[in-house]
Image (tube, rainbow, N blue to C red):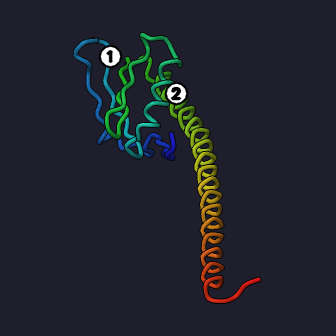
Amino acid sequence: MGEMSRKAKLLEPVDLEKLNIKRDHYFPNAYIIDLPLDSMPDHVWLDIFEREWARSIHLWDRKLFVIGDKLRLLTTKHDIKDKLDWVKKVIEQTNSDIDEYNDKAQARIAQREERIGEELKKQTLSEEKEHVEMIKETIRKSFKVV
């Protein structure tokens, strides 16, 4: 949970000629629609998306899959408008959660950098004291000292 994540969104405008729409083999009234994303989501986005997707609507209506840089939606011609609105809301919530995740990741990175900086400063001070003692010892051996 240390790295930053990227948002993903539906690619717009949609080129309807390139959009893959086909009838589903298992559900005779359903269609499979591959909606293009603007990028391939990383594992953090996918995890958050899956969580948002799973808690957003009834199990029977949750026929949405991420495949590479596409969202595969299974729906009927009658439900398409509601499903597209739902998909947009899930993506919007996922990206909002990504902002929160990135804020926390950035805070952890800043804390880690601060801690490393403090440790380095302590180490530098320790080394400096050690060098001063070595110089004093050399002077002690070379001269009479008080």
Q: Indicate left or right for 119 with 44 as reference.
A: right
The amino acid pointed to by label 2 is: Asp
Which residue is drawn at the image coordinates 43% and 44% (left, top)?
A: 11
Secondary structure type for disc 1: strand
Residue 77 shown left or right of residue 141 in the figure: left
Looking at the picture, how far across and down is residue 127, in whole percent? Answer: 60, 68
The residue that label 2 is drawn on is 85
Mark 2 is surrounded, within 10 Å at the Cα level, by few (under 14), some (14 to 19) or many (20 or more) other residues, namely few
| Tally of numbered tags | 2
Instruction: Give the crowd class for mark 1: few <14, some 14-19, many >=20 residues within 10 Å.
Output: some
Q: Specify the amino acid type for callout 1.
A: Ala
Find out whether the residues at labels 2 and 1 contact each other: C-beta distance under 8 Å: no
Quarter of the view holding residue 72? top left
Q: Residue most toward the bottom?
A: 143
| Residue farthest right in this picture | 146
Disc sitting over residue 30 in the figure = 1
Q: CA distance from mark 2 to mark 1?
A: 17 Å
Query: Picture coordinates of residue 130 (x, y %)?
Result: 61, 70
Q: Secondary structure at mark 2?
A: helix
N-terminal label among 2 and 1: 1
129 in relation to 104, above or below: below
